[in-house]
Image: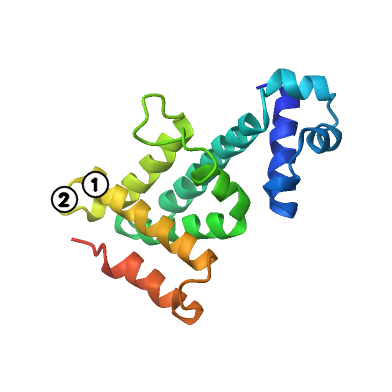
Amino acid sequence: MKRGGDAIVTTAWQLAEAEGWAAVTARRLAERAAVDLGELYERFADRDAVVAAVAVRGFADLAAALAAARTTADTPTHGWPAVVAAYLDFAYANPEVYDAMFAHTPDLTLGAEQTPETVTATFGELRAALAPLAAGRDEDTLSELGWSLLHGMVMLTRGGRLRPEAQDHRETLLTHHLFPPP
C-alpha cells in the first residue's frame, strides 16, 4: 500500500476511535487524509475495504504488542501474564479498531483459506506465550481457548456485563491459575 493508502488507514483508525465507525465516510476520510476522493476509491473499493485495512493493521499492531510483552518477560512462563496484559491494554485502548478486527470483518478468520499474515501472527504470539504452560496439552487448542477467554473478557467487560470491581481478580485467575506453569 502506498503512502496515500497508509494515510487513509491511519485517518480511518483515528476517526473511528474518536467518533465511531458511522463517522468514517468516504468524504471525511478523503478530506482528513488529504487525498482526492478519486484516489480513495482507487485504493479502496468501498467502506468495508477501509474497515478491513484498519483491522489488518490492528492485528499487526496487536501482534507486535504481544511479541514485545512476551519477549521482555523474565522467563518463558511469565510470557502469558505479560501477553494477557498487553492484549487487554490494546483492546481497551482501541475499542473501535478491536470491533473492526472481530465484528466487522468476518473474512479475517484464523481458519480461512487465506488468513491474513497479521491474524496468523497474533495467534502465533498467543501460542508462543502459552506453549511453556502446555504441559502435554495441544498447544493450538490451548491457544484457541486462551484467545477465546481474552476476547470474551474484553467484550463482556466493554458491554458492562461483568462486575468492574472483580476485573483484577479475573485477570489474576486467567494469568496465573487457569494456565499454571507445569
Tell me if residue 169 comes above or below residue 78 in the rendering: below
Q: Residue at x 36, y 40 (%)?
A: 124
Tell me if residue 171 comes above or below residue 58 in the rendering: below
Task: Tell me, for residue 62, which label it has, or none.
Answer: none
Seen from the viewer's position, the closer of residues 85 and 50 is: 50
Q: Amino acid at mark 1?
A: Thr
89 vs 51, left or right, is: left
Numbered label tally:
2
Tell me where residue 27 sits by quadrant.
top right
Q: Residue at x 58, y 34 (%)?
A: 52
Tell me where residue 177 sits by quadrant.
bottom left
Give percent across and percent down for residue 43: 70, 21
Give percent across and percent down for residue 57: 58, 37
Q: Which residue is mark 1?
A: 141
Q: Is residue 74 visible?
A: no
Seen from the viewer's position, the closer of residues 76 and 101 is: 101
Distance between mark 2 and mark 1 Cα atoms: 8 Å
Mark 2 element type: loop
Q: Which residue is mark 2?
A: 137
75 vs 96, left or right, is: left
Mark 1 crowd level (few <14, some 14–19, many ≥20, 10 Å Cα): few
Whether residues under marks 2 and 1 lie with C-beta atoms below 8 angstroms apart, the answer is yes
Give percent across and percent down for residue 48: 62, 33
Q: Is residue 98 visible?
A: yes
Q: Amino acid at mark 2?
A: Arg
